Amino acid sequence: MHEVRFSGFGGQGIVRCALITGKALSMYDDKFATMTQSFGPEARGGACSSQLVVSESRILYPYVTLPGVLIALSQDSYTTYEPKLKDGGVLIYEADLVTPKEDDGRVQMYPAPVTRFAEELGNRLFANLVTLGCFSAITKIVTPEAMKKALPGLVPDRFLEVNKKAFDKGYAYGLESLEKKPLVTGDAQ
Amino acid sequence: MRKTAADPKGVLEGSHFLDGDHAIAEGALAAGCRFFAGYPITPSTETAERFAERCPAAGGMFIQMEDEIASIAALVGGAWGGQKVMTVTSGPGLSLMMENLGLAVMTETPMVIADVQRAGPSTGLPTLPAQQDMMQIRWGSHGDYRIIALCPDSPQECFDLTVEAFNLSETYRVPVFIMADETVGHMHEKVVIPPAGEIGVVERNWYEGPKADYRPYQFTGKDVAPMVKAGDGYRFHITGLTHDERGYPHLTVDQNEKVVTHLIEKIDSNADKIIQLDESEVDGADVVVVSYGITSRIVSRAVQLAREAGIKTGSMRLITIWPFAEKRIEELAGKVKAIVVPEINYGQMVREVERSAAGRCKVVSVPHCGGAVHDPEVILDAIKEASK
């Protein structure tokens, strides 16, 4: 069982992150996944989070209670959700937008300049796919093959290839990060 | 009533990762719904959007009306025009529909209304869940009547129960509600849509006799009369006034007794056939938790914790809300110490449980003001307290 929270502000593709991952897991990785989301009435800029419960069997309780993985793409979301991340859990954060507190070893921190990478690919809107690449490489909760299969229908057709590139870029960066700082796996994730 | 296979044009066969709102739209299309009139309102709008996008390929029509009063009025027209019809709404829109809900009940017009509940009163908390309309759908229109209501707890059930809702609606010529909530409506999970041949659909019972003999009503209290399409040359009348078998106003107390008794009895006398429950470990339980919709999934956690704490705890999920499972609750109340009823409102269905239990056991309400689901620990505490 995994509990994952994606967080940031409206417009960063936070809900889409969980949607793609949930579809990949439940349709192509043979897992059960339940995705819930919370957002304010604002379309852009408001606090936004989406949650995913992943399991080998049917999920009854649909909510994340103590996530083992947190993706934080804004300072606000980091501040709000980092304290709710499980001890030993994985934190993947936007390196240029989030200034974390000093690493005290409570959680396993992986910075990733996902917005910068996305801009290098032509548009910061691809940042969520870069993020998903990092997430897939670091946590191994979802396979990269399933993620790519899940993309059609969830990203515009004309941007399918560049989104795959964005995913690959994040995936490669995630693997590099792991080499520098191997993940300690256990119950936490 | 006889079921036939679904029309493949409306069936999006296969596995999908869908939210509950979209699954309702797919259920409607699979059930043969080809007319949808609605007005957008959070958190139900996604159903209308998906139906609008998908229905042309299935030969259907979507119309955005000027408000919810007009939306449900259009359904009455659409159904008598020969289509299976539906609308979707939430709190404030549901309130606007109440008058014409009565018209639909009185004219025995089949239709499905999905209510994706949000927290009220008034505009309340538009993007957050509640279960506060459970009594409104039952009593919100004036006069004595019955409706049917089903309560899904997952996107898969949003699909399955929407198909069922249309089948019940055709079988009893009555408005049927899908009582979803914001969480189920916006929650994404895998939804498996079977091939058209495996989806059982109740088609409208069309009249086949001589035109001159057609009667749109029969007041048997059991079955309903077959229907025809307006414009096909039949001579009949549809009115909200008390009416005779031809549908023409017949304003006497005797006739009113016939009509109203029929509206009530056609549901009550078939309640055992309509009611679906999902029970777990109720035999030998000291405490049974009765819940519905999203709350039943929170209950699953609380019940697991209670069993781990050594309390014999059973669970009963109301899939059918109305007609209410009064016989089964009465039976259970004679066997258990207590029934615990958590719901995202200040105590609505718990009143039905109390009425049915009639003092045979303790009945404990676990209310919630709306805008979130219960903390499972709160339900656990209520189970512990009730088991003493």
Image (cartoon, coloured by chain):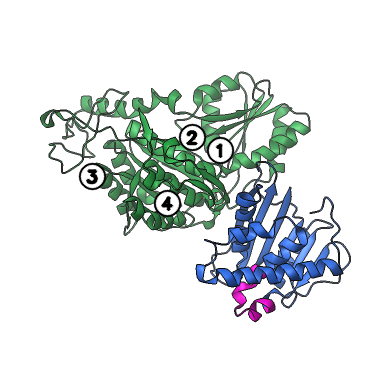
Q: Residue type at mark 4: give it.
A: Thr
- Circle 3 residues within 10 Å: few <14, some 14–19, many ≥20: some
- Circle 2: element type: strand
Q: Nearer the viewer, mark 4 or mark 3?
A: 3
Three-letter residue code for mark 1: Tyr
Q: Residues within 10 Å of mark 4 (few under 14, many from 20)?
A: many
The Cα–Cα distance between marks 1 and 3, rounded to whole angstroms, is: 35 Å
User: Label 2, label 4: how many angstroms apart (C-alpha)?
Assistant: 18 Å
Residue A37 in the image: x percent, y percent?
60, 57
Q: Quadrant of residue B350?
A: top right
Q: Which residue is under mark 2?
A: B321
What amino acid type should be assigned to the residue bearing mark 2? Answer: Ile
Q: Is residue B9 visible?
A: yes
Colour seen for chain B: green
Residue B292's label in the rendered image is: 1
Chain to which the residue tagged by mark 1 belongs: B
Label 3 amino acid? Gly
For the view shown, which residue lies furthest in the left direction? B212
Please report the residue visible at 47 percent of the width from the left and 57 percent of the height from the top: B42
Could you say which quadrant of the image residue B224 lies in?
A: top left
Distance from disc 3 to disc 2, alpha carbons, whole Å, reads 29 Å
In the rendered structure, the colour chosen for chain A is blue
Real-space CA distance between mark 4 and mark 3, rounded to the nearest whole angstrom = 22 Å
Q: Nearer the viewer, mark 1 or mark 3?
A: 3
- Looking at the rendered structure, whether the residues under marks 3 and 2 are on a common chain is answered as yes
